[in-house]
Amino acid sequence: MASNPPPAVVIVDDEEMVITSVRAFLRLETEYAIHGFTLPGEAVKFLETNPVDVVVSDYLMPKMNGLELLAKSKQFQPEAARVLLTGHADKQSAIRAINDVGLYQYLEKPWDNQQLLLVIQSAIERTTLLRSLREKISALDTAHSNLKDIQAKLLRAFL
Amino acid sequence: MEEEPRHLAELYRMAVLGRLTAKIVHEITTPAGSIRSNNEVLARSLDALGKLLSDATVKKCAPPAKALDILETLKNLAGVDKIACDRISAVVRGLKTYARVEEGELRKTNLNDLLRDTLKLAGVEFRNRVTLVEDFGEMPAVECYPQSLSQVFLNLLVNAGQAIEGEGQVTVRTRAENGWARISISDTGTGIAPEHRDRIFTPGFTTKPAGEGTGLGLVITREIVVDHHHGTITFESEPGRGTTFHARIPITHPRNRS
C-alpha cells in the first residue's frame, strides 16, 4: 500500500492554551497532522484548499462563531466530520449545531482527553468511509458509462 | 426577632454578580480544562521520557530526538499551565474584591487597583467582543467604601459593554484633579437618546429588554457616588457614537476633613 498521508485534524479555538493542550495530547497519542488556528478566518482559508478529516471548533470566538465556521467547513469539505468543543453550554446552540451544520459530536469543556480522542478517531473513520464510498460510486459511474458505450458500439456493429 | 432588612444596594450587588456567573464559569472552565488535559499529558510524557532515557543509557547512545521533542512539549505545557493559573487567579481575585461585604468603614484605597480587579470581572462580559483600553493616571489613595465603589465600576462597565452592539471599545480613564479622583468610562456604543437623558437616574427606568434591566443600576450608582461619597456623576452621550460616564470622588472624604 502506498504511504497515505496521516489523517488531518483542524482545531480552532481563540484560546491558544486550548490548542497547545490538545495538540500536545494528540501528538503523544497519535500520528495525526494537527493544524491549530486561533483565528476562525485563517481556519476557513486553510479549509478552502487543504483536505482534512476532522474539524474541532470552539463556539464563542471573535468575528466568527463556531457554528459559522463549521458551516463553512461543510461547504468546502462536506466529508470532513464537524465537532463542536464548547465551554458555552447552552442547549439552543447545541440544537442549532446539530440541525444546521450536521454536527458529528458536541463536546463540553472541560473536556476529557480519552473521550476527545475516541470522538476524533471515530470521526476520522467515518470520513475515510465516506471518501471511499464516494470513490466507489464514481468508479461505478465510470464503469456504468463504459458499459453503455460498449453496448452502443455493439449495437452499431450488429445493426 | 426580625432580621435587619438588607440594603437594596447590597441585594442589587449580588444580583449583578448572579447574572455574570455563567460567564465567570466559562472564564474559569477553559483554563481549568487546559490544566487538566496538560496534567495527564505531563504524566504520560514523563513515563515515555523515562523509558527513552533508560533505553539510551543501556545502549550507551545519545538521547534520541524523540526525547528532546517530548522535553520541548513539556516546556510548552508548563508555560500554558502558568498562564492558565494566572487567568483563574485573576478572576477569583476580582470575585473576592467584589463579593466581600462592605465593612461600612472608609478605607484609603488605590482606585487603579480596585478598577483593575473589577475589570477582570467585567471582562467576562466583554470577552472577544469589546476591546478594553486602560488609561490610568497617577492616583493618591482615595478615602472611600471600596466594595461600594467596585459596584459602581462594575455597573458602569457592564452598561458600557451592553451599549455596544457587536464589536467596540471601552476606555477606562483615571485622573487626580485638585483634590478629586475622576474615573471616566467611555464606550463606543449606541449612546443615550436625548429624550431618555433626564430619566436615566430615575428608579425603574430602563431601555434594556424585560428581564434584563432592573432600572436600578444607575440609581444605586448615583446613590453610592453622590450620597455615600459626596461625589458627582455626570455623562455625555452622542447617539451612534457612544457614552462617557464621569464619576468624581473627593480624595479625602468630607467626614474626615478638619
Image: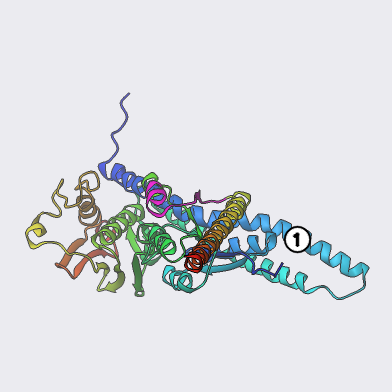
Q: Give the x, y percent position of residue B195.
A: 6, 59
Residue B251 vs residue B52, the one in the foreground: B52
Q: Secondary structure at mark 1?
A: helix
Asked where in the image residue B75 lies, by quadrant, the reply is bottom right
Q: Residue lying farthest left?
A: B195
Residue B62 at least partly seen = yes
**Quadrant of the frame with the N terminus of chain B:** top left
Residue B86 vs residue B126, the one in the foreground: B126
The reply, left or right, for residue A45 in relation to residue B54 is: left
Residue receiving disc 1: B46
Q: Give the x, y percent position of residue A143.
A: 54, 63
Q: Residue lying farthest front?
A: A159
Say how the picture is coloured.
rainbow
Residue A130 vs residue B171, the one in the foreground: A130
The residue type indicated by label 1 comes to Leu
Rendered position, A47 above or below B15: below
Asked where in the image residue B117 lies, by quadrant, the reply is bottom left
Residue B140 vs residue B30, the one in the foreground: B30
Q: Going 36% across and 58% down the picture, which residue do you hit?
A: B122
Residue B85 at least partly seen = no
The reply, left or right, for residue A126 in relation to residue B115 is: right
**Quadrant of the frame with the C terminus of chain B:** bottom left
Asked where in the image residue A140 lies, by quadrant, the reply is bottom right
Say whether residue A97 is magenta: yes
Q: Give the x, y percent position of residue B158.
A: 30, 57
Q: Give the x, y percent position of residue B94.
A: 43, 56
Q: Going 11% across and 61% down the picture, which residue do you hit?
A: B193
Magenta span: A95-111
